[in-house]
Amino acid sequence: MATTGSVIDPGNPTRPRNRKVALLQRAIAHYRFPLFKKLTEDSTFDWTFYCGCNDIGTGLVSTEIHQLKTRPIRVYNLFGPVQYHAGVTLREFNALLLDLGWALLSNPRYLLEARLRGIATIGWSKGIPQNPEKKEGSSKGMYQRLIVGMCDTIVAYGEISRQFLVRLGFPEQRIFVAQNTIDTVRIADETPVSLEQKQSLAAGFGTGDRFIFGYLGSLIPRKRVESIIEAYNICRKRGADAVLIIAGGGSSEAKVRTAAEASPFARDIHFAGRVPAGKEGGYFQLFDAYLSFAEGGVGVLEAMANGRTVVSTPEKYPETELLMDGENALLASDRTVEAFADRMHSALTHRKSLLAIGESARKCVLHEATLERMVAAITSAVTAAIARRRASRT
């Protein structure tokens, strides 16, 4: 059984030495490192991070990973996105926080073990289905209810995720909302450096004073980057002059490149490949408008922190719920390519207004999506979960 006393660590009087929390992640991406480092430094708990190897795409260097208390896990890719994580030892911990990805078949095993050992369980999830407009199967819904039912508390990304979890039947008072975030304050503070990087990138791409649409993120099916190219073609056929820069990599890269090559404006579509960690700011500053067609993630938040205008569909997603049309973003009237192209064209024809919209976006994200707020939500969720486990034994 997990210990529940309160032995104080002399080196840090605010941290009870045996209130140990295990956090299970597939891998620690570079944009998550500031959050985990802040949890380690500022939280009242002793954190251990179980993670798989930091393969390409995570961007985290060994000097950073060594600043965290980590333990390796084995990640087995079974089929499609389905994985099983092995090698996690829970007996020494008071609480377990894990990603509630529905494709992680190891979750039931660790949640059940934690329950049997009296260890508090905290889920961490966007919650919402990958395709909100597609009806979920009854078997998946039953599995989701089983998983969330084994959690004492859940940290949810944004209000849209909270609503989804409530619909699954999870008690609202045990949900702690934390807007998904990156180190937005640092990004805003590093604007001068990003502007220097922008000048070098502009010279390399040879764009001159032309309007630049940009996308930086994963090139995977659910992001629908080829739809961005289709909308760009429509926009150009209307007489607009602009270039499109696509940065990133992923399983859909070949498909996206094929779509670009088939475009009548192919010579104005540029691919930057994967961007090294710490170099993203220059690209966001280079973009006059950042494009997000589907499942806008941390790229939306990073664009906002850089004071860029985001052009997005009106999708309901945790990161995009911060976007307000005409105030801090430009939102299409619906989720069609045609409507998205219309809003892209609006950005071109109202270029002077983009600075004010971008500045409003920066203020919004610095208020709503900070590391401090996320750490506070996670700490509250862990505290409540431990208290609930203790109460269940009395």
Image (spheres, rainbow, N blue to C red):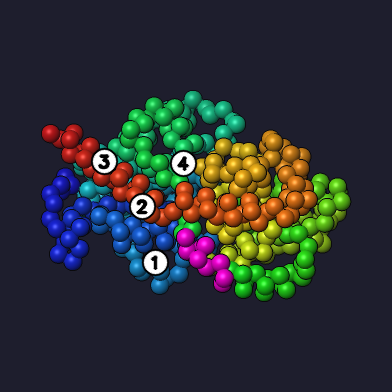
**Numbered label attached to residue 65:** 1
Placement of the N terminus among the 4 image quadrants: top left
Q: In which quarter of the image is residue 390?
A: top left
Assess whether mark 2 and mark 3 are in contact (beta carbons under 8 angstroms): no
Q: Distance between the residues labelled 1 and 2?
A: 19 Å
Q: At label 2, which amino acid type do we have?
A: Val
Label 2, on which residue? 375
Q: How far apart are marks 2 and 4 (CA)?
A: 14 Å
- Main secondary structure type of the part rendered in magenta: helix
Precedes in sequence: disc 3 or disc 2: 2
* Of the two numbered discs 1 and 3 in the rendering, the one whose residue sits closer to the viewer: 3
Magenta span of residues: 185-193
* Of the two numbered discs 1 and 2 in the rendering, the one whose residue sits closer to the viewer: 2
Q: At label 3, which amino acid type do we have?
A: Ala
Precedes in sequence: disc 4 or disc 1: 1
**Tag 4 secondary structure:** helix
The x and y percentages for residue 192 are 57, 71
Assess whether mark 2 and mark 1 are in contact (beta carbons under 8 angstroms): no
Label 4, on which residue? 158
**Tag 1 secondary structure:** helix
Q: Distance between the residues labelled 1 and 3?
A: 28 Å
Precedes in sequence: disc 1 or disc 2: 1
Q: How far apart are marks 4 and 1 (CA)?
A: 28 Å
The x and y percentages for residue 185 are 47, 60
Residue drawn at (74%, 54%), measured in percent from left and top?
351
Precedes in sequence: disc 2 or disc 4: 4
Does the magenta run of residues contain 287? no
